[in-house]
Image: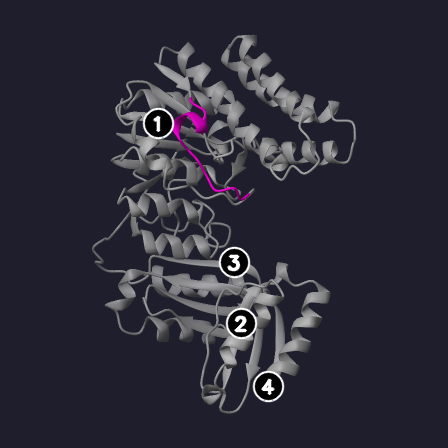
Amino acid sequence: MKVTKFGGSSLASATQLEKVLHIVKEDTSRKFVVVSAPGKRSSEDIKVTDLLISYYNRYLNNENTTEIIGKIVRRYEAILDDLGLTKEVLNDIQQAIQQLSTLSKDNNPHLLDAFLASGEDNNAKLVAAFFQQRGLNARYTNPKDIGIIVSDEPGNARILPSSAKKINQFKTTEEILVIPGFFGFTEAGDICTFSRGGSDITGSIVAAGVEADIYENFTDVNGIFVAHPGIIHEPRTIKELTYREMRELAYAGFAVLHDEALMPAYRANIPVVIKNTNNPEHPGTLITTSRTVKHDPVVGIASDQGFASIYISKYLMNRELGFGRRLLQILEELGLSYEHMPSGIDDISIILRERQLTIEIEEELMKRLELELEPDELRITHGLSMLMVVGEGMRQRIGVMADSTAALAFNKINLEMINQGSSEVSIMFGIQENQEKKAIQALYKTFFED
């Protein structure tokens, strides 16, 4: 039994939906189909989710919403017309979209979630109707009905343990259940979305709940590349990698798969495969609990921008009781979370996301660090990229760190920070954003070019 999730690019047009139909029909074990909202049809197009955000903002600001409602409805209408579906489906979708503007604005923390979730919800209705028209025994299934009950955290919902038993009841279904991704319902009955990109999370939750043999995630590429194709021309596709490797790569910027989506499948020991809707015969990339490392110690190179580094140096810091606790307390009281904190005998660096730092918060942070920790040296560096080299094989291969730093040094790339976790699955380098492309090219040449 397979749980199959299709991303927005796979559902953006009638042409793409025909491909989706073919994929589902060719394998009768595909009983659970999780769908995203329609994505872009071209680079100039707008995703339905982004249209819904615009709709929400206009409604919240008491602006006229007629035009934006029309744009959203026409996106679905174009698909329906090209597929030859009845207007009954369109009427249902149009009514659901218009009803959003009747929701309460006052003391409603779930309002944005309700707007955003409608993209996936209406698309699931459309896809189910299309499957039925083409002879499949399929039906739309609401997340509440299948048992996706989540924590009451708007925009950042988490599945509740009590959901597993209810979802498991559907494992013997003879129908194809078409499920909207990205959201669930709280115990009080409110819509709550996962973090953006969370349709991947829904697919993983369903796969774990029904104890699927595999979770398929269809997108618009042949799998996961060893490096960003916008930086490396025609990079290799990774054939197989572990959950830990994928989680590291996803955290560091690989956008093919939402990193949180791995956890439900990982805990249930369900393999995940990334495949291409436009080239379904390609084997894609398989993500498993473990793999046999044969040759390459590194499976991928990833990077992400938008970091800042706070460097603190103080003689005999290591002997000063409570230094780390006081540092973390300052961050907590200012509402700041850190990403990494490599340290030495007399120094420590705090890596955090720059988006947290307003001018006021940064001034207060530096002032408190100076007054309460009394460092010998204190400085902040903005505009950093975190560059990550990932691979389970690094534990069996001596010299990966040396090869990496040598390649970066040869290309005159200055390192602001180096960090290797105890798991030895990844090495992280902090570099200036303007050196990111050059650094990735240097590392790719070192590890992937013969």
| Separation of marks 4 and 2 at Cα, in angstroms | 15 Å
The label number, if any, that marks residue 103 in the structure image: none
Which mark sits nearer the N-terminus, 4 or 2? 2
The image position of residue 65, as x and y in percent, is: 74, 26
- Mark 1 Cα within 10 Å, few/some/many (few <14, many 20+)? many
Q: Which residue is at the front of the view, 5 or 228?
A: 5
Amino acid carrying mark 2 in the image: Leu
Helix or strand or loop: what does disc 4 sit on? loop
Is 137 covered by the magenta stretch? no
| Separation of marks 2 and 1 at Cα, in angstroms | 44 Å
Q: Which residue is mark 4?
A: 375
| Separation of marks 1 and 4 at Cα, in angstroms | 57 Å
Relative to residue 246, is residue 171 depicted above or below? above
The answer to whether the residues at label 4 and label 2 have Cβ atoms under 8 Å apart is: no
Amino acid carrying mark 1 in the image: Phe
**Residue drawn 55% across and 9% down?**
88
Helix or strand or loop: what does disc 2 sit on? helix
Q: Mark 3 or mark 4, which is nearer to you? A: 4
The stretch of residues the image draws in magenta is: 141-153
Which mark sits nearer the N-terminus, 1 or 4? 1
Q: Which residue is mark 2?
A: 328
Q: Is residue 199 left or right of residue 173?
A: right
Q: Residue furthest bottom?
A: 315
**Residue drawn 51% across and 10% down?**
84
- Mark 2 Cα within 10 Å, few/some/many (few <14, many 20+)? some
**Residue drawn 49% across and 81% down?**
322
**Residue drawn 22% across and 58% down?**
293
Amino acid carrying mark 3 in the image: Asp
Q: Which residue is mark 3?
A: 304
Q: Is residue 287 left or right of residue 71?
A: left
Q: Which residue is at the front of the view, 113 or 180?
A: 113
